[in-house]
Image (spheres, coloured by chain):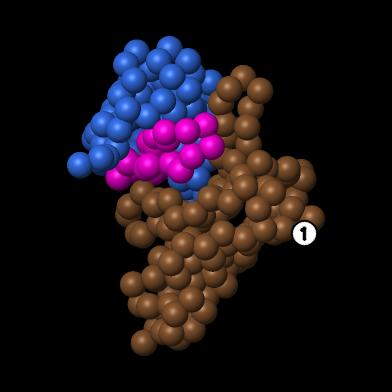
Chain colours: A blue, B brown
Amino acid sequence: EAQVTQNPRYLITVTGKKLTVTCSQNMNHEYMSWYRQDPGLGLRQIYYSMNVEVTDKGDVPEGYKVSRKEKRNFPLILESPSPNQTSLYFCASSPHRVGEQYFGPGTRLTVT
Amino acid sequence: SQKIEQNSEALNIQEGKTATLTCNYTNYSPAYLQWYRQDPGRGPVFLLLIRENEKEKRKERLKVTFDTTLKQSLFHITASQPADSATYLCALVFILTGGGNKLTFGTGTQLKVEL
């Protein structure tokens, strides 16, 4: 089944404890993105990647890192999480530069 | 400043009627516009894409219009069903010179179709 998977789905952590949210797609898509979704603010793009080893900042990149060492994987790294990073995170992939985004199921992160 | 506006209030309609959702934007010139459906606790699901030089796009019971002069897109669901109840998001798509793209999403409109 063609899909985007994210892990973990739920995570509660403490301020400053490094964490990684994994994202993997099995559709051989070149484009991948990370978004966060907050009430009243909608989905905001954190980082995106156009291909292996090619990444760039989205609208809200502060406090996040990404890497794209393989085409299928695009992990999101929070080196020192803070409470304002409590949010619902979505990974997405796309076959084309302007094509439809295929979203993962989401990761609900709480930083206390 | 740049802004995307979708009806913040929920839209309640009766089964069988046509639902019309609005996406307005200011100070943007997107190359494309997309519509997504999102159910509670789940990721958005792509529905339709329309290019800036297209006036209208249809897919089954769905229709999207794109007026770059008015800076507005309308999303219609005809013969609506309770299963159409969800939040609908519009997204502006910008092509970046470096080869990437940027999607800017509206906050969504919640649609509820009642029996």
Chain for mark 1?
Answer: B
Is B17 placed above or below A81 here? below
The question of residue A106 being in magenta is answered with yes
Q: Which residues are magenta?
A: A86-107
Q: Is residue A60 visible?
A: no
Total of numbered circles in the picture?
Answer: 1
Residue B32 is situated, as x and y percent measured from the top left of the image, at 61, 45
Q: Which residue is depicted at the point 44% across and 28% down?
A: A31
Is B100 placed above or below B103 here? above
Q: Which residue is depicted at the point 33% across and 52% down?
A: B42
Q: Determine which quarter of the picture holds residue B28.
A: top right
Residue B2 is situated, as x and y percent measured from the top left of the image, at 72, 44
Q: Which residue is depicted at the point 33% across and 72% down?
A: B83
Residue B14 is situated, as x and y percent measured from the top left of the image, at 45, 86
The N terminus of chain A sits in image quarter:
top left
Q: Which residue is depicted at the point 42% across and 35% down?
A: A94
Q: Nearer the viewer, residue A95 or A4?
A: A95
Label 1 Cα neighbours within 10 Å, binned few <14 / some 14-19 / many ≥20: few
Is B46 placed above or below B95 here? below
Q: Is residue A111 left or right of residue A12?
A: right
The question of residue A95 being in magenta is answered with yes
Q: Is residue B31 visible?
A: yes
Is B34 placed above or below A74 here? below
The C terminus of chain A sits in image quarter:
top left
Residue A11 is situated, as x and y percent measured from the top left of the image, at 27, 37
Kind of element beneath mark 1? loop
Q: Is residue B55 left or right of residue A89?
A: right
Q: Determine which quarter of the picture holds residue B102.
A: top right
Where is mark 1, residue-wise? B70
